[in-house]
Image (spheres, helix red, strand yellow):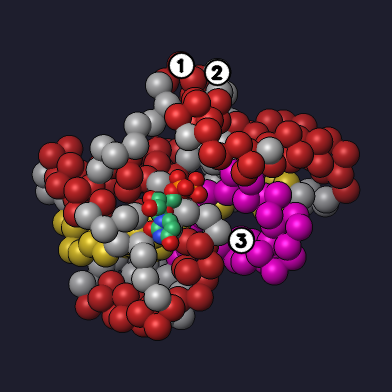
Amino acid sequence: MDKVNILGVKVDMVSIDEAADKIMEFLDEDKVHAVFTPNSEIIMRAYRDEEFCKLLNGADLLTADGIGVVYASRILKKPINERAAGYDIARKVLKKMNDTGHKLFLFGGKPGVAEEAKEKLLIDYPNLNIVGTRNGYFKSEEESEIVAEINNSGADMVFVCLGAPKQEEWINRNKENLKVRAALGIGGSLDVFAGRVERAPEIFCKLGLEWFYRLLKEPWRIGRMMDLPKFAVTVLIHGKKYKQD
Ligand code: UDP
């Protein structure tokens, strides 16, 4: 897979469909695959923190979540065709899993959210095999119990929705002990599946203004969002120093 090196993070140049196909292929390979969907905030974090950058690059699939990352790829002359957000990839994967019968575990969100997401998903995908749910609030000593719960469920795939960078770190820390074939770190997706959070209307996404919609809905995000302009400036000034292979 072709990659674009954005400030040290090697992002796969895949569309939503290609990412979903790749994830389904992972289910046939006998190892745990990590899938992360970095946005500009996360890439800025990796730019500042070498260890975190290594962690991201250790993933089996890294997709561009956010218009900032897509623009960065254009600036670096390796354009990614479309934004491949975790939620959109998950929808495609769910549709495929509805046909294949693979087993899915939903992990993350406030108590009750994963169960609500399960109920709603079964309306859209009646044959989907959801074998377990677990909220995303836990003490570190409970972690091995959670891994055991996921393993005992026989899940082929787990959605890990703890927000970034918690979910990436959780997957990385537990990769050795997990038996699933794919672990997807997909942020607030369970909230959206559960109907607790609305996605930005299509028009905002098309115009690359989803961040603006989120800011209107969740103004406390302003601090985190200041990384977007910093990211753009950093890519413009330093982006070309990173080797593209
Ligand atoms: N969350 C969680 N455990 C935590 C912190 C957060 O399960 O310890 C959940 C939270 O309930 C929400 C999601 O993680 O469902 C974070 O969503 P957000 O949209 O903030 O994700 P991001 O934009 O960081 O990917």
Magenta highlight on residue 42 = yes
Vertical position of residue 135 compared to residue 5: above or below: below
Q: How would you rate the neighbour count of disc 2 (Cα within 10 Å): few for under 14, some for 14-19, many for 20 or more?
A: few
- In the image, 120: left or right of 220? left
Q: Are marks 1 and 2 in contact (CB under 8 Å)?
A: yes
Secondary element at image label 3: helix
Q: CA distance from mark 3 to mark 2?
A: 28 Å
Residue marked by disc 1? 203
- Residue to which mark 3 is pinned: 56
Marking on residue 109: none
Rounded to the nearest angstrom, the CA distance separating label 3 from label 1 is 31 Å
Look at the magenta stretch and give its main secondary structure: helix
Three-letter code, disc 3: Leu
Kind of element beneath mark 2: loop
Asked if disc 1 is less than 8 Å from ligand 1, the answer is: no
**Whether residue 194 can be seen here:** yes
Residue drawn at x 30%, y 62% is: 135
> Is residue 48 inside the magenta stretch?
yes
Residue 233: x, y in percent? 81, 36
Start and end of the magenta stretch? 33-59
Mark nearest the camera among 3 and 1 is 1
- Of callouts 3 and 2, which one flags the residue occurring earlier in the amino acid sequence? 3
Disc 1 to disc 2, how far (Cα)? 6 Å
Q: Which quadrant of the structure image shows residue 59?
A: bottom right
Closer to the camera in the image, 168 or 104? 168
